[in-house]
Amino acid sequence: MGKFLAGVWAALNWELVVDLLPLAGVVFGALVLGLIFGPIGKTMVGLALGAFLLLYHDKIPVPGWSLVILWIAVKVVFLFISVFEEQHKEKVKKWEKALGGAKMPSALSVLAPDFNSPADIKAAKESVFTIKTMAGHGSGFFISSGGWALTNRHVVESDEYFGAVFLKNGKELTRGGRLFESYEEPDIAIVKIDAPRGKPLRLNFDLPKEGDDIFVIGTPLDSETLKGTVTKGVVSAIREEDGETLIQSDAVVHPGNSGGPMLDAHGNVVAVTVSKREEGGINFFIPVKDALAAIKTRQVKAIDKIT
């Protein structure tokens, strides 16, 4: 702290302060514009900083350079934030144009389970996507035709519109998504993705048994490099907590898996990933039957085929 204050004092000698008064006015005005006009004001702050370095670099004592470097670092961070915000706003405009007029149907048709074949994990991965919001990322999956999908409320509660990234034949495909309904208990959200041909997964409303093999698909930790991660485990227990049923499993999950599906050995969705404990191997999932039961205003029909 002493060195920092000494740097401040060394940098702010009277001659320099007098010289910088006009520039200080420009910076203050730019900051005000930044509050009012966002990126324009931030750009003016950057220009003022550039003028400061160009005109007064030879007058700044050596200890004062630490402050200048700190200022530059802060401005670089602001620049990246500003660019990211503008890019996100442009994307939201496009997503809103595609999904703004959509309405949720009075009934959702979901695929009945299939117990005659082993899980086709490769095909299932194409029905799971990464959700990207301003706050972070999570996972989701299709449950009905027309792009209707499930995820966790805590994944999308900060953004009405968001990005959905798929892996299709090994290539990434980004579409817009929109939050329609969300619920705190259970932690579930219904979203629509601008991908009407997205293939829904089959849903198994029966609770799995302890010891059953299961698969979990999602995007843990890194939204750029770990999309479509599959982990395998067993059902460790069926828990009742505060009136809510949760499936416990040792299948590995991390932040970013939230909202992704848990599949049984035949590839039917039995649950939605929701949380993990810090202790290894203790992870929790919302039974898909309970997730859909939360949609009290909708009728859910299980059918054999969706065209």
Image (spheres, grey):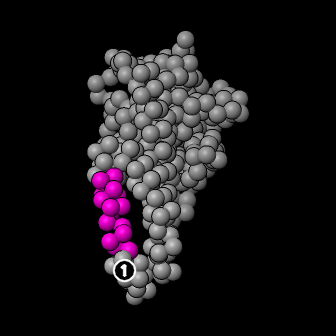
Choose between 45 and 233: the one closer to the eye: 45
Residue 207: image location, x then y, percent: 47, 39
Does the segment drawn in magenta span residue 64? no
Residue 59: image location, x then y, percent: 47, 75
Does the segment drawn in magenta span residue 17? yes
Quick one: which residue is furthest to the right in this view? 170
Residue range in magenta is 16-31
Choose between 223 and 305: the one closer to the eye: 223
Q: Is residue 237 above or below residue 177?
A: below
Name the residue rendered at 52%, 19% in the picture.
Answer: 196
Name the residue rendered at 41%, 21% in the picture.
Answer: 97
The quadrant of the image that shows the C terminus is: top right
Q: Secondary structure at mark 1?
A: loop
Choose between 207 and 292: the one closer to the eye: 292
Q: Is residue 241 above or below residue 289?
A: below
> In the figure, is residue 225 to the left or right of 132?
right
Q: Is residue 195 above or below residue 136?
A: above
In the rendered picture of this protein, how many numbered marks are placed on residues? 1
The quadrant of the image that shows the N terminus is: bottom left
> Disc 1 marks which amino acid?
Asn
Residue 183: image location, x then y, percent: 32, 38
Q: Is residue 22 visible?
A: yes
Residue 289: image location, x then y, percent: 42, 33
The crowding category of the residue bearing disc 1, from other C-alpha atoms within 10 Å (few below 14, some 14 to 19, many at least 20), is few
Q: Is residue 119 visible?
A: no
Name the residue rendered at 30%, 48% in the picture.
Answer: 33
Q: Is residue 302 above or below residue 1?
A: above
Q: Which residue is mark 1?
A: 13
Secondary structure character of the magenta stretch overall: helix
Where, by quadrant of the figure, is residue 120 drawn?
Answer: top right
Choose between 159 and 124: the one closer to the eye: 159
